[in-house]
Amino acid sequence: MNLEIPATNRSILAARGPRNVVDPWRPYHFLNEPEFSADGVIDDVSTIFLTNRECPFRCLMCDLWRNTTEETVPLGAIPAQIDFALSRLLPAKHVKLYNSGNFFDPKAIPTANLPKIANQVRHFATVIIENHPRLCDARCGEFQTLLGTQLEIALGLETSHAPTLARLNKQMNVDDFAHSCELLLKAQIRVRAFVLLKPPWTSEEQGIERAIESVRFAFDCGVSCCAIIPVRAGNGMMEQLGQQGLFTPPRLSSLEVVMRECLSWKRGRVFADLWDARQFADSPADAEIQFARLEAMNLQQEAIVM
């Protein structure tokens, strides 16, 4: 396939490998992690990666489908997963319910389970979920009312570079993102954004520039927290793009440049996504020191120079 031509759902699905075996009654992963909070202190966060039906938006770069089901999970399975994780995690002030897609997709999280979920996590100061901008509507405010605590919704902006965003098969544009932010902020819901570093069809320098501009755009939309995610291979489609010379992973030094610039603005929290990030080190010898600098920037929210 010539991937200069925009990918489609069909071509993205055709490039995939197998899914992982998952249990609909268990989260596929959970952990406690420190995070610099909106209050300006480092708090523990319980992060639960819920097992549920795959996201219907087939984003070109996504590999989260690997840990999803092909059918909607049984009623009660999501609350059971949350109970399973919380009973095994140390106490934390905040919780992330990440579900490899969209919290308000009823085929992923059955609507009938929302009151139970709200009761399970209402004791946390902040409940952070993820959702596609086009699935943000009155249900978001209704869920915050059910919670009785601060809801924060993470939206995938990916990039504010409109031509690239259109080619990612995200099925949204920057106006959709801005509209969703406006709706959520009116409901007193906090917004964080996911921003990609060096998506396909992007040079290293363009990757840096466009990630910075994307964070700026997100803050202009009222987002209070941005997570920068280095684009990686591993979903089949990215390998095809790499073979055609249309994608190479970013360098950790590029992630450092983006972090230093965006943190210097003091407009909101900025985090580097460090999941398996050592693979992006400029050289094996640099991996640990680069990772340590980025980890320190995450926790201190201050630019750290080499």
Image (cartoon, rainbow, N blue to C red):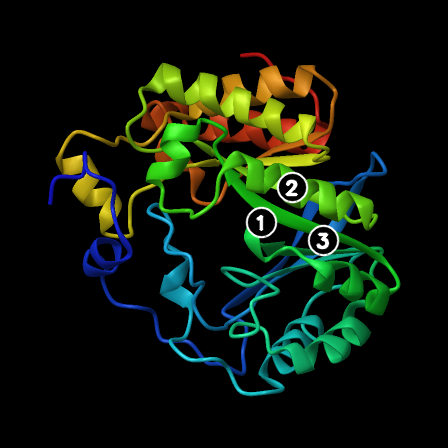
- Spot occupied by residue 57 in the image (x, y as percentages of width and height): 42, 57
141 left or right of 200 in image: right
Callout in the foreground (3, 1): 1
Give the tally of numbered discs: 3
The answer to whether residue 190 of the structure is visible from this angle is no
The residue that label 1 is drawn on is: 133
Give the residue number, with chain letter if any, for mark 3: 45
Binning the other alpha carbons within 10 Å of mark 1 as few (below 14), some (14 to 19) or many (20 upward) gives: many
| Amino acid of disc 3 | Val
256 vs 230: above or below? above
The residue located at (73%, 33%) in the rendering is 222
Q: Gap in Å between the C-alphas at discs 3 and 1?
A: 24 Å
Question: How far is disc 2 from disc 1 in space, using C-alphas?
Answer: 8 Å
Q: Label 2: which residue?
A: 179
Residue sitting nearer the eye, 185 or 268? 185
Q: Amino acid at mark 2?
A: His
Residue 105 vs residue 38, the one in the foreground: 105
Q: Which residue is drawn at the image coordinates 58% and 73% (left, top)? A: 109
Residue 274 point in image, percent of width and height: 51, 39
Q: Position of 238 compared to 277: left or right?
A: left
What residue do we see at 56% from left, 28% from top? 294
